[in-house]
Image (spheres, helix red, strand yellow):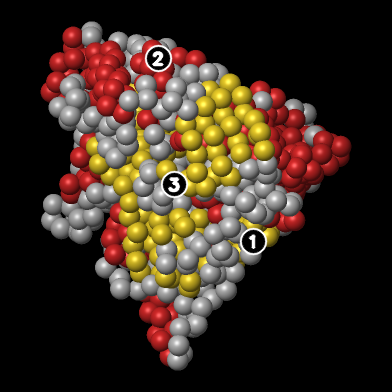
């Protein structure tokens, strides 16, 4: 009987083969008929007499974790939070200029220690939570600062001595010392999104999935792993958004997102990273490609606890060994520029012209290794995020390192493991991928003594610019502050605790049917004026 | 040699061809360092990415400028390593379990059968995927995962054979002649079970190669830069319309290898099966 079993399973071999062939076809022929579908949709649209608008904007993106501003960790969350919440002030879309949001105006005392915000009247919370008062704002920030909340952003509000609400429309912050970036700390970004304190209390643990804000859209439904549906907030102080619903469709795989866009299943492809694909969309009149120089950076993190990375000559050798052009042009297809210093161009204080900077020079790398006593290189390993461009970027770095004798093993890890790696600093090498709007956030969250692992994300436990960071934060004169950041960048590049790699451009691909799309710097967008012409 | 092969495969020319193709692939894997330098397979040269097939790069290059042909040659190593060692491990584990179940009495048998049934309820790829995800992606772990996932199939096969064989007269005769259980197991039972195990092994190698390629495709293959067929396909998948050569060639490599191994397995099965003796070429369909 058992022998007969084998005979039958052998007969199945051919069937299995057919299945393999099918799989290959599926894997290799996925995108085949898609472009026709895209074209068909727009033709159907032009048949109708006037423009007709859909009641929904569909955005393909990858699901995050929480919509509670106290605990954001992923840009994917932030992009949605921007629709749900407002802040006291906000960045003008596409710039780092600060403009009013919930606060119509604000005053700063001459000594820079007191900030007084004058709130808009009649701003309504979503879901019937009544009118926004100054007390709500105070409670929100107190919650972020409360150690019991354990918010990763508590540190950014270190300078705040107290917050108070003298009347329902006035919020006053008292600072311990002047802070040049105080407005950037309460801006509508991360912890600056003001969550309804009562809802936070009502929902408890579940608040991250039932957020209540004052933004243009409110959360209607979150089906984990499928979509997040937002509904227009009719009471939004800026006027109800033009399109009634926004549906964020969870499509983690980029090529699947590409096909969904071509098939007309989504209108907006958020955060495209593959240059070749972006180029094919740029050449297609059915799509608009939005590209901004984001302040998103990639930095090669080096752990001095792992010998020989404690030797600055070795770290310099590694910086000289990397072919940055192969990353910016090859891996990123021109969607990135080389990052000379830890502060990206476009951000306050960036000084790409300082010395030393490290350019591709494998010969110099070998010399430095020889000098450091490693003429034959050494072995090391890296934990690398397994998605986006990081694996390809590390293939290049690995190959560059091999050329100078450094044998770097790559472990591709998922996002939670990677985040843990950054906090625990338990491997020789990792990569920091982050988007910040001002230099203090980069420095004080990733290269500041008090946030050495495991207390924070200072992977190399770098303490070399602690004093300068504090000085720059307290310096209110722009010129002097810029000068301090210049010194920081020089010192940083001399000590080289980590190797700045690239700063990215951020790209959204939007169907031609979509009008009024405004893209922000930090992977976000203003959707309030967006309309989508009805396809098909 | 050809004559004896023809005799063994009973004139099944397809199986003989499959044997040569398989041998050629194994040779390529063994001789990879002589055929193409490793550097050519892993060196990054982004200025020469996405090159279509040309005399310099017969199968073209991928996004990072890797030569696809060199990657295919070196990629045959992990594929075959997982195929041979993973399946070998499965055969050893499964056979041992099958022998114990078949000879260990009703209680032990019942327990083994339950465990085997439970494990077989999981799709092969899923089981391997979970194990690799838990243990970490490395070649050794993939071999273990494939071995453990496949073992229940061997265990069931061997257990069935043992139950069948132990009732046969010559085993009864050996037993009454005073042979020990170990001797009966290894000399009488296992030797007679080797044929079916070998057939299953050949077919298993083919499936294991697909499992390895699938794991690599899903990003759970051996860590980079180790080139594997599955990873080349995964790397080429976003560019399937713009640069189809990146995934066509590794796809063909998997297809040819798996086809050859399956035909070879069929041939061996027919060769070992006394009932198909002297029938000439066996009709595959």
Q: Is residue B167 left or right of residue A46?
A: right
Q: Residue A406, image x and y in percent?
A: 28, 22
Residue A401, picture quadrant = top left
Residue ranking furthest to the right: B107
Residue designated by label 1: A235
Q: Earlier in the sequence, mark 2 or mark 3?
A: 3
Image coordinates for residue A189, horizontal then vertical, percent? 50, 42
Asked if residue A136 is positioned above or below residue A534 in the image, the reply reads above
**Residue depicted at 28% across the width and 49% down the height:** A335
**Residue at image point 54% right, 34% down:** A116
Badge 3 and badge 1 in a common chain: yes
Q: Nearer the viewer, residue A131 or B283?
A: A131
CA gap, disc 2 and disc 1: 45 Å
Q: Nearer the viewer, mark 2 or mark 1?
A: 1
Q: Nearer the viewer, residue A267 or A150?
A: A150
Is B94 displayed left or right of B57 in the figure? right
Please name which of the two marks, 2 or 3, marks the residue nearer to the observer. 3
Label 3 – label 1 distance at C-alpha: 21 Å
Which residue is identified by label 2? A466
- Residue A184: x and y in percent read 46, 35
Chain for numbered disc 1:
A
Q: Quadrant of residue A10?
A: bottom right
Task: Determine if marks 2 and 3 fall on one subunit.
Answer: yes
Instruction: Write the residue at 20% across / 40% down.
Output: A325
Q: Say what secondary structure mark 1 lies in.
A: loop
Secondary element under disc 3, as helix, strand or loop, is strand
Pointers 2 and 1 within a single chain = yes
Q: Is residue A269 left or right of residue A395?
A: right
Mark 3 surroundings within 10 Å by alpha-carbon count, few (fewer than 14), some (14 through 19), many (20 or more): some
Up the image or down, A74 lies above or below A213; here it is above
The image's mark for residue A99 is: 3
């Amino acid at each position: 009987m058992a022998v007969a079993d084998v005979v039958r399973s052998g007969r199945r071999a051919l069937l299995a083969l057919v299945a393999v062939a099918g799989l290959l076809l599926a894997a290799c022929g996925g995108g085949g008929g898609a472009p026709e579908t895209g074209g068909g949709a727009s033709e159907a649209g032009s048949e109708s007499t006037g423009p007709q608008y859909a009641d929904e904007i569909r955005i393909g993106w990858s699901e995050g974790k929480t919509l509670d501003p106290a605990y954001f960790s992923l840009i994917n969350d932030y992009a949605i939070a921007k629709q749900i919440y407002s802040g006291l002030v906000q960045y003008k879309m596409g710039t780092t200029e600060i403009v009013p949001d919930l606060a119509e105006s604000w005053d700063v005392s001459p000594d820079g220690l007191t900030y007084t915000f004058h709130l808009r009247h009649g701003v309504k919370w979503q879901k019937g939570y009544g009118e926004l008062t100054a007390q709500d704002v105070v409670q929100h920030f107190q919650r972020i600062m409360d150690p019991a909340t354990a918010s990763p952003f508590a540190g950014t509000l270190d300078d705040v001595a107290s917050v108070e609400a003298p009347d329902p429309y006035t919020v006053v912050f008292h600072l311990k010392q002047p802070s040049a970036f105080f407005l950037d700390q309460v801006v509508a970004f991360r912890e600056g999104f003001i969550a309804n304190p009562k809802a936070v209390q009502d929902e408890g643990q579940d608040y991250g999935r039932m957020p209540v804000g004052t933004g243009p859209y409110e959360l209607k439904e979150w089906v984990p792993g499928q979509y997040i549906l937002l509904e227009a907030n009719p009471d939004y102080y800026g006027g109800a958004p033009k399109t009634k619903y926004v549906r964020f469709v969870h499509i983690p795989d980029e090529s699947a997102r590409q096909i969904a866009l071509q098939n007309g299943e989504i209108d907006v492809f958020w955060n495209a990273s593959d240059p070749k694909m972006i180029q094919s969309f740029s050449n297609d009149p059915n799509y608009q490609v939005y590209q901004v120089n984001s302040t998103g950076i990639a930095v090669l993190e080096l752990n001095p606890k792992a010998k020989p990375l404690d030797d600055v000559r070795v770290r310099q050798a590694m910086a000289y060994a990397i072919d940055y052009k192969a990353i910016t042009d090859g891996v990123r297809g021109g969607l990135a520029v080389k990052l000379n210093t830890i502060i990206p161009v476009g951000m306050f204080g960036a000084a790409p012209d300082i010395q030393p900077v490290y350019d591709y020079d494998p010969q110099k790398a070998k010399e430095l290794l020889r000098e450091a006593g490693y003429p034959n290189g050494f072995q090391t390993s890296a934990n690398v995020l397994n998605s986006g461009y990081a694996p390809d970027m590390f293939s290049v770095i690995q190959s560059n390192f091999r050329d100078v004798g450094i044998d770097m093993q790559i472990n591709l890890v998922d996002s939670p493991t990677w985040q843990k790696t950054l906090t625990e600093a338990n491997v020789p090498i990792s990569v920091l991928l982050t988007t910040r709007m001002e230099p203090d956030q980069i420095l004080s969250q990733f290269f500041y003594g008090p946030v050495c692992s495991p207390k924070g994300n200072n992977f190399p436990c770098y303490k070399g610019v602690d004093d300068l960071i504090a000085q720059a934060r307290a310096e209110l004169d722009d010129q002097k502050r810029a000068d301090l950041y210049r010194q920081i960048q020089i010192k940083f590049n001399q000590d080289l605790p980590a190797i700045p790699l690239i700063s990215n451009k951020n790209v959204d691909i939007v169907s031609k049917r979509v009008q009024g799309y405004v893209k922000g710097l930090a992977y976000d967008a203003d959707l309030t004026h967006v309309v989508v012409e009805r396809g098909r | 040699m050809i004559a004896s092969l023809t005799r063994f495969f009973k004139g099944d020319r397809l199986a003989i061809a499959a044997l040569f193709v398989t041998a050629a692939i194994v040779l390529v894997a063994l001789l990879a360092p002589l055929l193409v330098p490793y550097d050519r397979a892993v060196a990054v040269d982004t200025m020469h990415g996405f090159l279509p097939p040309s005399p310099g790069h017969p199968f073209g290059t991928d996004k990072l400028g890797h030569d696809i042909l060199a990657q295919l040659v070196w990629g045959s190593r992990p594929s075959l390593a997982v195929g041979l060692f993973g399946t070998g491990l499965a055969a050893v584990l499964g056979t041992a379990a099958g022998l114990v179940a078949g000879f260990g009495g009703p209680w032990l048998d019942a327990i083994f059968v339950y465990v085997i049934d439970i494990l077989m309820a999981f799709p092969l790829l899923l089981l391997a995927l979970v194990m690799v995800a838990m243990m970490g992606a490395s070649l050794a772990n993939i071999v273990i995962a494939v071995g453990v996932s496949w073992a229940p199939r061997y265990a069931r096969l061997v257990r069935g054979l043992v139950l069948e064989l132990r009732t046969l007269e010559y085993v009864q005769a050996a037993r009454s002649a005073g042979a020990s259980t170990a001797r009966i197991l290894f000399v009488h039972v296992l030797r007679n079970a080797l044929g079916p195990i070998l057939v299953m092994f050949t077919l298993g190698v083919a499936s294991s190669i697909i499992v390895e390629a699938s794991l690599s495709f899903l990003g759970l293959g051996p860590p980079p830069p180790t080139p594997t067929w599955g990873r080349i396909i995964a790397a080429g998948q976003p560019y399937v319309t713009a640069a189809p050569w990146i995934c066509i060639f590794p796809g063909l490599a998997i297809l040819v290898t798996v086809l050859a191994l399956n035909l070879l397995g069929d041939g061996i099965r027919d060769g070992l099966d006394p009932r198909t003796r002297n029938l000439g070429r066996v009709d595959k369909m």
